Image (tube, rainbow, N blue to C red):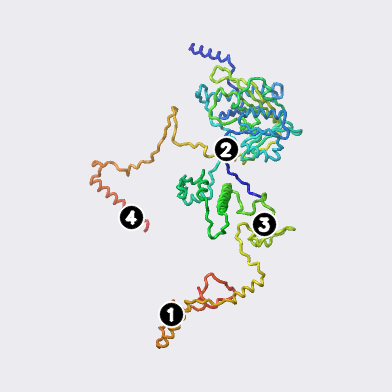
Amino acid sequence: MSLLRIRKPKTRKGKKVLLAREPQLVEPARTMVFLDGRKCGGNVKQCMKDLQQLKKPLVKVLNRKNDITPFDDPSSLEFLAMKNDAAQFAFGSTSKKRPDNIVLGRIFENEILDMFELGIKRYLSISDFKNEKIGTCVKPCLVFNGPKWAQTEELRRLRNLFIDTFHREKVESIRLQGIEHVLSFTVTDDMNILMRSYQILLKKSGQKTPRIELEEIGPSADFSIRRTKIASEDLYKQSRKQPKQLKVTKKKNITTDGLGNTKGRVHLGKQETGSIQTRRVKALKKTPEEKRADRQKKKVALKAAAIEALTASG
Amino acid sequence: MDVVQEVLEKHRKELDKYKPITVEKHLECRLDVGTLLITDPNDLDDRQIASAEKENYLRALTRDNTQLLVNAIWELNTERVDESIVAKLPEPTTVLPRMRKPPGPRVLTKWEKFAKEKGITKKKKEKKTYDEVLDKWVPTYGFKRAEAEQNKDWVLEVPQNVDPNTDMFQKKMDLRNEKVAKNEIQRMKNIVRAKKIEMPRSGYLGPEAATSSQLLTAVTVAKSSTASVGKFQNKLPKEREARGLGVKELIPGAKRKQSHIADQPEKEANLDLIKSVLNKKPKLDVEKAISLQKQDERLARDAESGNKPAKKSSKKGKGSRKAVGKKPKGNRGQRAPGKKAAAGRKRR
């Protein structure tokens, strides 16, 4: 019976670690923690290794066996992800009931947002393809084939998870020659997901844009979807909420032309020409006749008003 | 005109040498160039996927889609950076979930809130102050401050009102430790307040952390929290009640009333009370006695001289009203609800 102490960091490094675990305005690129289940070997192990290869250096690999069942009790999984400051996890296991099982998921607020259990039906690893490899840290193009991706909520979330996992990080610009890797995900009618990985070869086309040829480099896998757990609509919406500070507010009346010049439009409001002081000129002054006429006019108007008021009251 | 035709013809022939970069699609593909993403909603060819040509089909399909994506990328604005051509990507349109909620404003601590309300600003302390005892500049905090203090307080006086054998150094250290502990508790409370968790001041700590006696207390207090102080609450079989003098005493943080039951036996206590009343001696108020004496003397003198004391005017006025009976006590003393007030001014 004691209050859980919320410790103050004692070292500068410890402070850094704790600060990294706090919510941030702009979040860093997502790391993925790789965990082994009670038994993890063969295709699953190979698949995990290839995924690590694809995600490097945003990975955290834990090599011990874990007695975790993510769909029954995810608490220790969540804890491990929290400790390693990972936003995503891959959990590999193989059993008689679920052979070659890999669970991919992500974390929101130290709790599992959604996770998908994929069974590996057929697997060819990167090392099975004997050809030139691409370098690490290459931002891949992502291709999703098939009409089913948009049809069910589950597949939409899975598609989002794949994008989240493989897009690496948000970039402002990209080197044109650096586009050399494409990952394709095809969902078939019998709900299998075919994942393929190709190298992009840029060929001449006689125009500015090159013609593209693909060469398979692996990994190549056929997944079947087993169990899934997706976040409720509310939670998912909450997790996608972006901070207000990052929203770009449009500034009114400022434009930039083609040459890069900034132009502003200024509104001055109505000018009160009647009350402003202008130069007095004798010629503009009223003559005595005009003054008299004005006075007369005023008198007549007053009289008329008085008569009207009297008739109204009487 | 012939020249134009010729050039066009030549260009077309040149293009024929290469494979095309255009792709025909039944439905338009959704592009997100910012994340290098393309989604193809067109139907798949089931027969090809089932056949041995599956890999080739997938590759061709992916190639076409990638070509579309590449076409879009090559149309973007480019610039030259270190001998390579870089395309500026637009903002991604796919919204990905965050890892944590966006950060809110920092919650002020209790002191910070108070200081803000009162307009108290932090005063910066000097890093070093001159110490007259040591005849040195001494750090006010941090590195070597403790050392300086030790040098200064190498001897401590034992005050007269404490036991001469007390260790004043130990006492000083205890005082400091107490302060540190208090500060830690206040820090915790600030964290709790910032996280908006309901926490009891002390005592019951929630179902996970509480002991059985604390739980029992909580149940007893909760049951008695009705309008009729829990008189009509049902009891479970074999239900125990928390021990205590009463419910009020069980509530954590509530003020404890002194018990009317003392250690002394009742009879003895009552006898003591009677004795204290009976043994009372009248108090001697010297001043009052003198003034009474003076008055008596004055009256005697007046009677001797035959002068009657000056009579006050018989006119009835506010001031002339004689106070009859007791002066009403404002909110003091016991009220006797059965008894009617015997005397006194009737107040309307």
The first of marks 1 and 3 along the sequence is 3
Q: Quickly name the residue at label 3.
A: B217
Q: Is residue A240 left or right of residue A44?
A: left
- Which chain is home to disc 3? B
The amino acid type, in three-letter code, at marker 4 is Ile
Marks 1 and 4 sit apart, C-alpha to C-alpha, by 69 Å
Residue A114's place in the image compared with B128, above or below, is above
| Outermost residue to the right | A96
Assign a secondary structure to mark 1.
loop
Marks 4 and 3 sit apart, C-alpha to C-alpha, by 89 Å
The first of marks 2 and 4 along the sequence is 2
Mark 1 or 3: in front is: 3
Residue B290's place in the image compared with A78, above or below, is below
Which disc is residue A207 wearing? none
Q: Quickly name the residue at label 2.
A: A13
Which disc is residue A307 wearing? 4
- Which chain is home to disc 1? B
Q: Position of residue B303 (x, y in %)?
A: 42, 87
Residue at screen point 44% across, 31% down: A256
Rendered image quadrant of residue B39: top right
Mark 2 or 4: in front is: 2
- Which chain is home to disc 4? A
Q: Quickly name the residue at label 1.
A: B316
Q: Position of residue B337 (x, y in %)?
A: 59, 73
Residues packed near mark 4 inside 10 Å, few (<14), some (14 to 19) or many (20 plus): few
Mark 1 or 2: in front is: 2
- Which chain is home to disc 2? A
Q: Is residue A152 visible?
A: no
